[in-house]
């Protein structure tokens, strides 16, 4: 099991990434505005269900790395940290544009759910994110790596569901003003980019020590 200090650090890092709206949040907000709060909440559940596919894949992959080679696992952690820094730099250098996704005609809630799940499950960027993020908080000496990874991944998805659900509920009052707002886009990219870079540098130096 992850130790309490690692879990606390993980929660802080996850919340720092989740509190700033990203593409999935804009999708959920747009869905909530288009079809109502229930559709937004169902869409959020679908998105995180798709994320579960990547968590399970990361659990199997990370566990296999640890069993095969401690050195290879350390290399993956370092590469993952550099990938987080890369994400941060790319975010900071991105053009200040916020686009609301084009949503299809209103559908039944079951279809809304599975659409969100499929979109996220087939997103390779989500897979890369979990493979870069989760190993930074796995401590092989603390016990089964697969169980640690699964717990961390499930905790991230739970926090993401709460965060996305909150955005879905608030979309009716503030979500519409955020879409296409350049001030919001500038704030979003600087905060998100800085968090990615700080997380990547912090995990590399912590792992080295």
Image: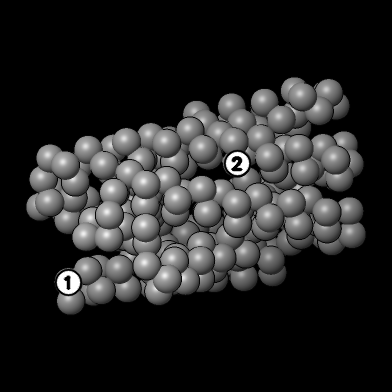
Q: Position of residue 14 (x, y in %)?
A: 51, 62
Q: CA distance from mark 1 to mark 2?
A: 32 Å
Tell me the number on the disc at residue 59.
none
Identify the residue at horizontal 29%, vertical 49% (top origin): 145
From the viewer's side, name the closer residue of 134 and 92: 134
**Element marked by disc 2:** helix
Q: In the displayed structure, does residue 76 sit left or right of residue 59?
A: left
Tell me the number on the disc at residue 48.
2
Q: Where is mark 1, residue-wise?
A: 208
Identify the residue at horizontal 37%, vertical 52% (top origin): 148
Which quadrant of the figure contains the C terminus? bottom left
Q: In the displayed structure, does residue 71 sit left or right of residue 13?
A: left
Identify the residue at horizontal 58%, vertical 60% (top origin): 18
Which quadrant of the figure contains the N terminus? bottom left
Q: How many marks?
A: 2
Q: Would residue 118 be visible to someone looking at this image?
A: yes
Identify the residue at horizontal 23%, vertical 74% (top origin): 205
Quarter of the rendering containing residue 39: top right
Q: Position of residue 71 (x, y in %)?
A: 10, 52
From the viewer's side, name the closer residue of 145 and 79: 145
- Estimate how packed mark 2 is, as few (under 14), some (14 to 19) or many (20 or more) residues with alpha carbons within 10 Å: many
Circles 1 and 2, Cβ within 8 Å, touching? The answer is no
Above-or-below relation of 139 to 49: below
- Estimate how packed mark 1 is, as few (under 14), some (14 to 19) or many (20 or more) residues with alpha carbons within 10 Å: few
Q: In the displayed structure, does residue 12 sit left or right of residue 5?
A: right
Q: Would residue 93 be visible to someone looking at this image?
A: no
Q: What coloring was used for the rendering?
A: one colour
Q: Position of residue 136 (x, y in %)?
A: 32, 60
First in sequence, mark 1 or 2: give its number: 2
Q: Position of residue 27 (x, y in %)?
A: 69, 43
């Amino acid at each position: 099991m992850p130790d309490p200090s690692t879990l606390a650090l993980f929660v802080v890092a996850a919340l720092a990434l989740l509190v700033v709206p990203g593409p999935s949040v804009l999708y959920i907000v747009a869905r909530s505005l288009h079809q109502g709060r229930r559709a937004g909440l169902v869409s959020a559940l679908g998105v995180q269900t798709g994320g579960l596919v990547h968590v399970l894949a990361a659990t199997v992959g990370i566990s296999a790395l640890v069993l095969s080679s401690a050195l290879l696992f350390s290399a993956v952690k370092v590469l993952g940290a550099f990938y987080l820094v890369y994400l941060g730099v790319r975010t900071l250098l991105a053009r200040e544009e916020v686009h609301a996704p084009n949503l299809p005609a209103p559908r039944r809630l079951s279809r809304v759910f599975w659409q969100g799940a499929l979109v996220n499950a087939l997103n390779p960027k989500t897979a890369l994110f979990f493979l870069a993020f989760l190993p930074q908080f796995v401590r092989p000496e603390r016990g089964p790596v697969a169980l640690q990874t699964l717990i961390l991944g499930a905790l991230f998805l739970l926090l993401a569901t709460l965060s996305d659900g909150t955005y879905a509920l608030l979309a009716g009052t503030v979500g519409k003003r955020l879409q296409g707002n350049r001030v919001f886009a500038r704030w979003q990219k600087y905060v998100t980019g800085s968090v990615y870079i700080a997380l990547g540098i912090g995990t590399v130096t912590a792992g080295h020590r």
